[in-house]
Amino acid sequence: MSADRTRALGVLALLVAGCGGSSEPLAPQPSLSVSAVEARSADGTYAVRWEPVGGAIPDAEPFDIRFAVRRCDGRALPNAATFTVDAEMPHHGHGMNLVPLVERLGRSPEGEIVRASGMLLHMPGRWVLSIDIEEAGVAERTQWFVDVE
Amino acid sequence: MPSAPSGSSMWSSTLRVAWVVILALGSAPAAAQAPNTIARDRLPAELAQLTDDEVARIARMSPLPALAADPTNRHADSAAAAEFGHRLFFEPRLSPKGVSCATCHDPVRYFTDGKPLAQGIGLSTRNAPTVVDAARRRWVGWDGKFDSLWSQALSPIEHPAEMGGSRDAVLALVKEDATLREGYERAFGPFPGTPDDGTLTNILKALGAYQRRIVSGTAPIDRFVAALEGVEAPAGSAGLDALGPAARRGLAIFVSKGGCYQCHRGPSFTDEEFHALGLAGANGKVAEDPARLAAIDFLQRNPMNSAGPFSDAPASPKASMVRGLRRTGELFGQFRTPPLRGVALTAPYMHDGRFATLADVVRFYDTLEGASPVGHHGESVLVPLELGEAGRADLVAFLEALTPAKSDEAEWWTNPPEPSLRTHPAPPGR
């Protein structure tokens, strides 16, 4: 898929899934690029945007992603909130061979900026990328299909 | 709405799952790996029916990128270290029984021994993989027990069934043998430089530096892909004719219905990761070798891994990968996807050398005869290909077209010359 088409899908996802409103005060963290894709979590509590660092998912090589999380009710995400990032191939019955290291980078107008280092989609096919946000004992998942050629 | 993948919940608290966006991201590779494009009008008849995605898989097969640096070994690209490592690689006195690295990694046999199971002092439990292009591997060994060539080097030296030596004996040999000691000192300075234990690590890193020099040259597939991309072939090279009709048909199978490309990806024809194929164990039924599952424990505990105190880059991305390795039951019986460049020269095949020929390997994938159920611990994508005899022969012809020429640095493929012939200067500061 071309970068233009990916970008277009990302913008479409923003329009469809964005929850409006901003979360928290400005901070020095840079925003994600326009091609980042957004979705709402299962119960609509969070809006999450993500993008691969470097702009593309490399072929069978490790990579990092950055994502921005904000609450759709406009409240700030508490510091105690935690994030878990994973990916699996439902049709193959396996996931990634690495556990990504998740690091909270800070806040931006887009919300909490987080980096997950050490992603590896080592086979072509359909992956399901999931970002779980846990707050006060309740976790909500946001997930995307990622088709790797 | 589809249900969540089974086993995805890892929460003791509530986890609610929804599928909110279906997004297809192209696998746009990193810029350095971006393939050139192949115009459809250049495709020979055997490939004309391929889809654009399948043609793109062909473009990604060549060329091999430049060898990546090994920051965990600061001597990796030192000529003096490689020369010392070259001598050590062929040195039978590293073993009390006269077994050298080259015994099982014989240059004449493309740095293998041609036997099902490696034969050192005793019989190993694994086939001897080639050293050619080994520096490109993310993980070393069939189970990926090591994460660098240098950290792997100690294992065969000390393994009782391989060389049966010891680190103390290696240190004593280098100290007492004038030629070896000179080689060490050219690379690293006085032996031993200090009372610390860095001397042994230096010796291992020299072996790693040498093995980085064992690289393959251009293969017919490279000339073929270049011709498809419109790159002018050098005079005397074959271009599109580098692959005959059978190999072209085999290539079409490889990138389409054969599904081979799923694991044998990119210019090295490997995803550098691990899979279970349902190969029966010695009992004729289920596999018994834990392979990758056990290797991860060993690797993460090995003080000579990329993250350890002997690494020259314990904070490198590779070190992070080692720390982040996931240990799950599905890794049981998984072995590393072998690269396919030069595969026609490395018989017999699989981790235990069970298949004598490439035809046997292809027959296994074609029929899955003798495969044991992999249950939920294996690849559900493996199904009999049903290529038939002609299709199997075409696939073998393609695999044979991955045979590279020796590299331009063929001096590394033979016994090292006598020390007096070496002209490499001593490092500064000696």
Image (spheres, coloured by chain):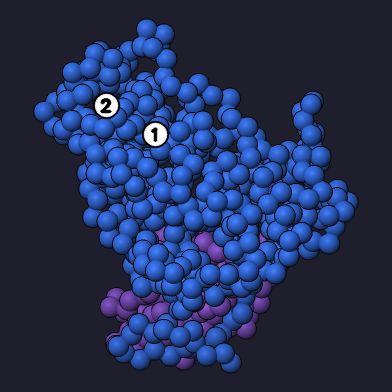
Chain colours: A purple, B blue
Left or right, residue B391 beside residue B179: right
Residue at 24%, 44% in the rendered image: B160
Q: Chain of mark 1?
A: B
Of the pair B9 and B124, the residue shown nearer to us? B124
Q: Is residue A106 visible?
A: no
Furthest toward the top, the residue is: B420
Q: Quick one: quadrant of the C terminus of chain A?
A: bottom right
- Front-most of B238 and B67? B238
The three-letter code of the residue at mark 2 reads Arg
In three-dimensional space, the C-alpha distance between marks 1 and 2, rounded to whole angstroms, equals: 12 Å
* Residue B362, position as x, y percentages in the image: 63, 59
> Which is nearer the eye, B44 or B230?
B44
Relative placement, left or right, of B424 versus B299 is: right
Q: Quadrant of residue B190?
A: top left
Tell me where residue B264 appears, x and y as whole percent.
Answer: 58, 56
- State which quadrant residue A17 falls in: bottom right
Q: Position of residue B254 (x, y in %)?
A: 69, 58
Q: Chain of mark 2?
A: B
Callout count: 2
Determine which of the numbered discs, if any, sits on residue B93 in the image: 2
User: As shown in the figure, which amino acid type bears the numbered disc 1?
Assistant: Thr
Q: Give the secondary structure at mark 2.
A: helix
Position of the N terminus of chain A by quadrant: bottom right
Which residue does the image show at 20% across and 36% down from the upper left? B166
| Circle 1 residue | B103
Above or below for A76 versus B41 = below
